[in-house]
Image (cartoon, helix red, strand yellow):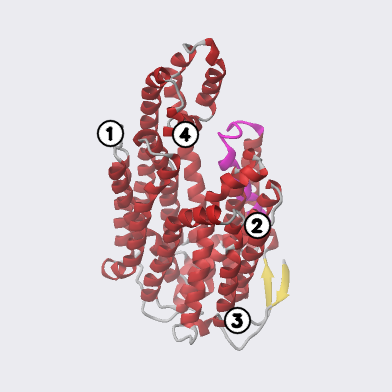
Amino acid sequence: METIQKTASDDTIEASAPELKNRGLLLTGLIIAMLFGALDGTIVGTAMPRIVGEFGGLGLMAWLTTAYMLTSTVVVPIAGKLADLIGRRVIYVTGLIIFIGASALCGMSQNMTELILFRGLQGIGGGIMMPMAMIIIGDLFTGKQRAKWQGVFGAIFGLSTVIGPQVGGWIVDSLNWRWVFYINLPVGILAVILISIALPKHKAVGNVKFDIPGIVTMIVGVVSLLLALTFGGKDYAWLSWQIIGLFVLAIVSLVSFVMIENRAQEPILPVRLFKNRTFTTINGVGFLMAVGMFGAIMFVPLFMQGIVGISASASGTVMTPMMITMIVASIISGQFIQKIGVRKQMLLGMIIMAVGFLFLGTMGMTTTKLLASSYMMILGLGMGLVMPILTLALQESFPKSELGVVTSSSQFFRQIGGTFGMTILGAVMNHKSSVLLEQNLTPVVKQLPAEASELSNQLTNMIHTNPQALYSSLLSPEALAKMPKEFVQHLLPILKDALVSSLHLVFTIGLVFVLLGAVLTLFIGNIKVSDRKPKKDDAEKDAELSTGLA
């Protein structure tokens, strides 16, 4: 263990209770930081074609997203624990400064390798920023007030998803792709100033004990697991030595992490938390919800492009109605929870999500954009009812001394669940498609004339390696317009039939994960949303936590 001396101050975290004088200023800073941090993910996506056009490196393009995802995911639980140990302000401002500095470096990048490295650094700042807003909301407000404000912050996150592509497109077209990153500088500096002024320092006496072995083993384990899930079945076969090696490294590292955490005085993610029914159940619901949600809705734009026949750029807009209903539901969820309670609202939201997946599984050749959008709105309604109260329920169930850890754990398990879902359902999609295309498309491909041998080889290879890319490249209106009519007549029905059948299976499995999450909500205890002010020490909750009965 390494130790450093904590900085003492006359202000304590308790000063950030509801009577805080600068609460309005602090909330403004939190909202600004949340908005520009959340916008970054969707804005950057619109700049990728321009980036590749300038730097080349098409094969490395996926790393612009992967590098950010890896670092932002792994740093979340570390940030939560450090916020408990050395205070909210120093951790939050550090994350903001890292994010701002990395954004500037991204904008100044001269090649793809530099940009990927700086995106990874930016992910560290983003991974610190995202849970800190919810942690501070837990400090600022009573339980009932938290419900409202966490719904508002959830709505801000959803809003960023809606406006991000439009803002990014405007920046790229009007200025330069580098301004997608530079725009973070003035906004981020304003957030740093507001939060530094309004958020009190944390008073602490004694030494902070950093769990360095735990941090190292967790980083190695989580990064290895995420890399294996990200590249398995795409860049490398599941049984390749690269993927097997990553899984083995992940298992060894995570087992070592658990052993280290059992002995650590200040563990990053205390193992004893997993003995607590509330902790495991709520994070289990969040994990299962994310598996189904992120793993299935990523395929809706593919359906809209391949079956409905809209352009690749326009297919992303089908997600907007879902995000709008999620925003509305997030805002009203704070008021709704007062009437029906945590468990009932969580169950209701999961059931509504299940209904949305059920309808998605009925989409076929005649489905219109309007109908698909209405199904997505149902899904968004369920998401908006569930997502804000996952964090709220954890904060209400644990003492103040654990607030950072349990709050960050909620986001951590959801991010892991999203990656797991995209991997599992992506593998299901590819396997089902490969079987159907091998049966029905391969005989047609073999009948192509000799002058089309290059195309025939490409199609055969994509059938076995990447059916999703096959759908995207051949079923778009732009691609179909360039193909001979006879070829389209033979090819199109087979491709569409395989895509619909594969997506039906994907949405069905997504439905199963959501239903499992709904069943798990039945085991959540009777969590009451309190009206009392947060306290640093809560003897009753500490006793429950230690016995694992909460």
Q: Is residue 464 visible in the rendered structure shown here? A: yes
Check disc 1 and give the amino acid type: Thr
Looking at marks 2 and 1 on the same chain, the residue that comes earlier in the sequence is marked by 2
User: Residue 200 at x, y = what percent?
Assistant: 57, 82
* Residue 366: assigned label: 1
Q: CA distance from mark 3 to mark 2?
A: 32 Å
Q: Where is 206 relative to 463, above or below?
A: below
Q: Where is 547 relative to 118, above or below?
A: below
Q: Are marks 3 and 1 in contact (CB under 8 Å)?
A: no
Position of the C terminus, as image quadrant, is bottom left
Q: Is residue 84 left or right of residue 492?
A: right
Q: Is residue 305 left or right of residue 85?
A: left
Check disc 3 and give the amino acid type: Lys
In terms of depth relative to the viewer, which is nearer, 474 or 298?
474
Determine the residue positioned at 59% across, 69% down: 186
Q: Quick one: SS at disc 2?
A: helix
Q: CA distance from mark 2 to mark 1?
A: 44 Å
Q: Mostly what secondary structure, the magenta segment?
A: helix
Looking at marks 2 and 4 on the same chain, the residue that comes earlier in the sequence is marked by 2
Packing grade of label 2 (10 A; few <14, some 14-19, many >=20) is: some
Packing grade of label 4 (10 A; few <14, some 14-19, many >=20) is: some
Q: CA distance from mark 2 to mark 4?
A: 30 Å
According to the image, label 2 marks what residue?
107
Packing grade of label 3 (10 A; few <14, some 14-19, many >=20) is: many
Q: Which residues are magenta?
A: 216-241
Q: CA distance from mark 3 to mark 1?
A: 59 Å
